[in-house]
């Protein structure tokens, strides 16, 4: 009897393992950076407003607390922190492909939404780059401000041509946004079905030009070229407000 029970237990365990394996799928988050609706290409000149042209050499940001919401409301955790980087997308082909994060072994079934944060949540923002091993998203020395005791949540860098001579030497854009006050999050409605052993792609986008919106125009980047002062977060908060508002399904 004990022998039969043992083999029955093994059979049940194997069946459960097989069922779990077949019930899993992969979700890919595909992020696209745009500029006025077209793929954003690094080092490519763009019209900023009626008087300025700009090119961007970098655009990256942390994403956090990413969850999928099943049709019945159950949350499925993807990651507490990761990093999206468009800095190397210096040709149209790369910009069109976008940046992907892949999450395997997720429960198959029907989903209705995705929740996502832009930046580093408060608890993680109390840590620092030296707390993490090489390769971890938060191990980036380039994205930690010792003086602010904060990560840089979003880093946007570029150059300005203000006189129309085609030379981008009239100023720099350094919108490096950090501190707990600028953290933003959002829930996006997106219905999809994740098949067993299948892959579902969630297409996400953010338009960098829209991140600089101010009233009926755009932030005066000649007067406000950088966001490096902890006692004045006005423009960093404006940028991040615009960013989370524009962030959505492509």
Image (tube, rainbow, N blue to C red):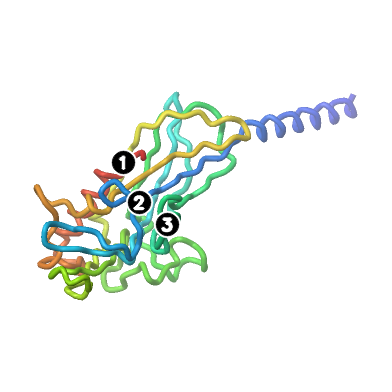
Q: Nearer the viewer, mark 2 or mark 1?
A: 2
Residue beneath the point at 44% across and 52% down? 99
Q: Counting other residues with Cα less than 10 Å from the Cα at mark 1, is it few (<14), some (14-19), or many (20 or more)?
A: some
Which residue is the extreme one toward the bottom?
A: 169
* 77 lies above or below 135: above
Q: Quadrant of residue 180?
A: bottom left
Decide if residue 12 is on the left or right side of residue 232. Answer: right
Q: Residue 39: which numbered mark, if any?
A: 2
Q: Counting other residues with Cα less than 10 Å from the Cα at mark 3, is it few (<14), some (14-19), or many (20 or more)?
A: some
Decide if residue 129 is on the left or right side of residue 25. Answer: left
* Residue 136 image position (x, y, % from top left): 49, 62
Q: Confirm or deny contact between disc 3 and disc 2 (CB under 8 A).
A: no
Helix, strand or loop under label 3: strand
Q: Disc 1 to disc 3, how far (Cα)?
A: 17 Å
Mark 3 or mark 2: whose residue is earlier in sequence = 2
Q: Disc 2 to disc 1, how far (Cα)?
A: 23 Å
Q: Confirm or deny contact between disc 1 and disc 3 (CB under 8 A).
A: no
* Residue 84 image position (x, y, % from top left): 41, 55
* Residue 232 image position (x, y, % from top left): 14, 64
Of the 4 image quadrants, the one containing the C terminus is top left
* Residue 69 image position (x, y, % from top left): 43, 32
Q: Which residue is mark 1?
A: 186
Helix, strand or loop under label 1: strand
Q: Nearer the viewer, mark 3 or mark 2?
A: 2
Mark 2 or mark 1: whose residue is earlier in sequence = 2
Of the 4 image quadrants, the one containing the N terminus is top right
Residue beneath the point at 42% across and 50% down? 96
Residue beneath the point at 68% across and 29% down? 19
Q: Disc 3 to disc 2, how far (Cα)?
A: 19 Å
Mark 1 or mark 3: whose residue is earlier in sequence = 3
Q: Counting other residues with Cα less than 10 Å from the Cα at mark 2, is it few (<14), some (14-19), or many (20 or more)?
A: many
Q: Which residue is mark 3?
A: 83
């Amino acid at each position: 009897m004990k022998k039969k029970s043992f083999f029955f237990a093994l059979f049940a365990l194997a069946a459960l393992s097989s069922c779990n394996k077949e019930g899993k799928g992969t979700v890919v988050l595909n992020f696209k950076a745009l500029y006025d609706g077209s793929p954003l290409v690094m080092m490519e000149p763009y019209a900023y407003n009626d008087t300025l042209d700009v090119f961007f050499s970098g655009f990256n940001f942390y994403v956090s607390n990413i969850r999928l919401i099943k049709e019945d409301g159950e949350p499925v955790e993807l990651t507490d922190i990761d990093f999206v980087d468009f800095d190397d997308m210096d040709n149209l082909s790369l910009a069109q492909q976008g940046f992907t994060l892949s999450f395997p072994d997720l429960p198959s079934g029907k989903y209705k939404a995705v929740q996502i944060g832009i930046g580093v949540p408060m608890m993680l923002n109390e840590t620092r780059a030296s707390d993490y091993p090489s390769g971890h998203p938060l191990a980036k020395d380039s994205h930690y401000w010792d003086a602010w005791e904060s990560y840089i949540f979003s880093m946007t860098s570029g150059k300005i041509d203000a006189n129309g001579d085609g030379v981008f030497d009239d100023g720099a854009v350094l919108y490096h946004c950090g501190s707990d006050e600028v953290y933003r999050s959002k829930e996006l409605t997106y219905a999809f079905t994740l098949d067993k052993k299948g892959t579902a792609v969630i297409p996400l986008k953010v338009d960098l030009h829209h991140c600089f919106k101010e009233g009926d125009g755009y932030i005066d980047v000649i007067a406000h070229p950088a966001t490096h002062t902890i006692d004045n977060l006005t423009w960093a908060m404006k940028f991040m407000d615009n960013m989370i508002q524009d962030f959505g399904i492509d």
